Amino acid sequence: MEERHSILGMSAFDAREAEALDPLVARRLRVLGAGSPLFYRTPIHMQRAEGVWMYDAEGTRYLDCYNNVPSVGHCHPHVVEAIARQAATLNTHTRYIDEGVLNYAEQLLATFPDALRNIAFTCTGSESSDLALRIARKATGGSGFVVTETAYHGNTSAVSEISPAYGADVPLGLHVRTVPPPDSRAHPGDVGAWFAANVEAAIADLQRHSVRFAALMVDTVFSSDGVFADPAGALAPAAASVRAAGGVVIADEVQPGFGRTGEAMWGFVRHGITPDLVVLGKPMGNGFPMGAVVARPEIFESFSRGSGYFNTFAGNPVAAAAGLAVLEVLQRDALMENARITGIHLRRGLAALAARHDVIAEVRGVGLYVGVELHGGAAAARAVVEGMRARQVLIGTAGPRGNVLKLRPPLCFKPTHADMVLTALGETLEHP
């Protein structure tokens, strides 16, 4: 059986491979322990960042083609100023009225379909996923969940049970079934119908084991599965099947959300569906810890009657200021349109590289979320990641085999930056 790779092990530093440990790495291992992973064979000591650039302790500049957390750019001055101003004025929990929190909630909800009108704030995407599971259970009376084969939805105990990306050491719950992502190579016909049939089979298997179905949860660009953004519309038949079975649809928008696809604010829009619950996370605050669940009011009301949700730090005034500043920058600087234009430029350049280099199996993606699948497995991908790092470009990997190069830069990434990536990748493929 082909080896599957854990999301935490991809492109990770392994102290056993090091001839000698850097003093700071040794100190980190001593204090944080072995469970705190680092990137690269030789970890980078980053000291500052700005826009699409990160700088290490020696002043070396790296082009960041990996981080979707600083969605509008590292240390964006408008976001930094909003955080500092609000932190100097008031920061408290949400059991007091704060107009800034309401302003942010209203403006964020205005970017969603009318059916999604309630929002609950959290501090992380993992907390959002965990809350979405709770709401789905209450709304349906079920406990069974369907996810894709290499999905990653977060790190709480409940969410790790529906995150096969962790690998064999973190077993899935007995109430979880997996389905392959909508990969047109696996089914070159009607991918949407094929995906829906797999979801229906998973639901039937849950029922056969006396597990009542609750929800299908998907990252709408299937990023951890290896980036399967197309075909647009592929999720619609599965959403219909889920609702016919009495379940709800949870869209995980932590990766594709906030305009990253270049075509819509949210990835689910490309598929012509309106989910019942939407999970948001790290791009919300451009690095300030934020998350949320957006819900249909009827679903959220049924959950709230039983217990409701309170999180001391979630939705605090500083978080709201950060989130509102991000929305303002997205609109003011037309970053969704930039993601569309730059993404097209980047994928065209990658396709040209693929025509010259047989190691590239396929280029996939939409907007500024791109996957480049390589022949040769994880070792080939890691060699490219290390080669790109040597050329001062930061990328990641994804997919069950760890052989998909993952490119998801800040949304201020321009075609000139994409050209730098293409040059570095071309050189790396010529001279690994």
Image: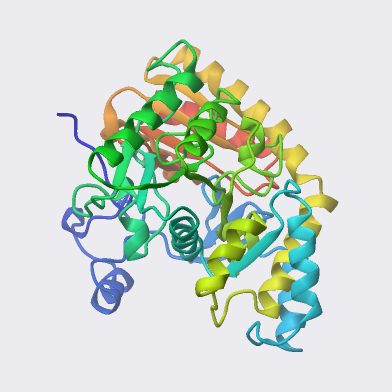
Q: Vertically, is 312 above or below 15?
A: below
Q: Quadrant of residue 158?
A: bottom left
Q: How many marks?
A: 0
Q: Vertically, is 167 above or below 220?
A: below
Looking at the rendered image, the quarter that the N terminus falls into is: top left
Looking at the rendered image, the quarter that the C terminus falls into is: top left
| Position of residue 177 in the picture relative to residue 301 (left or right) | left
| Position of residue 284 in the picture relative to residue 374 (left or right) | right
| Position of residue 173 in the picture relative to residue 228 (left or right) | left
Colour scheme in use = rainbow
Residue 14: x %, y % from top left: 23, 55
Q: Quadrant of residue 416?
A: top right
Q: Vertically, is 12 above or below 219?
A: below
Residue at the (54%, 74%) spot, across then down: 309
Q: Nearer the viewer, residue 81 or 57?
A: 81
Residue 240: x %, y % from top left: 54, 32
> Would residue 74 be visible to someone looking at this image?
no
Q: Nearer the viewer, residue 383 or 316?
A: 316
> Would residue 120 be visible to someone looking at this image?
yes
Residue at the (51%, 62%) spot, across then down: 128
Q: Nearer the viewer, residue 38 or 370?
A: 370
Q: Quadrant of residue 123?
A: bottom right
Pick out the residue farthest to the right. 332
Residue 390: x %, y % from top left: 42, 44
Residue 36: x %, y % from top left: 31, 66
Q: Nearer the viewer, residue 104 or 352?
A: 104
Residue at the (74%, 65%) spot, across then down: 105
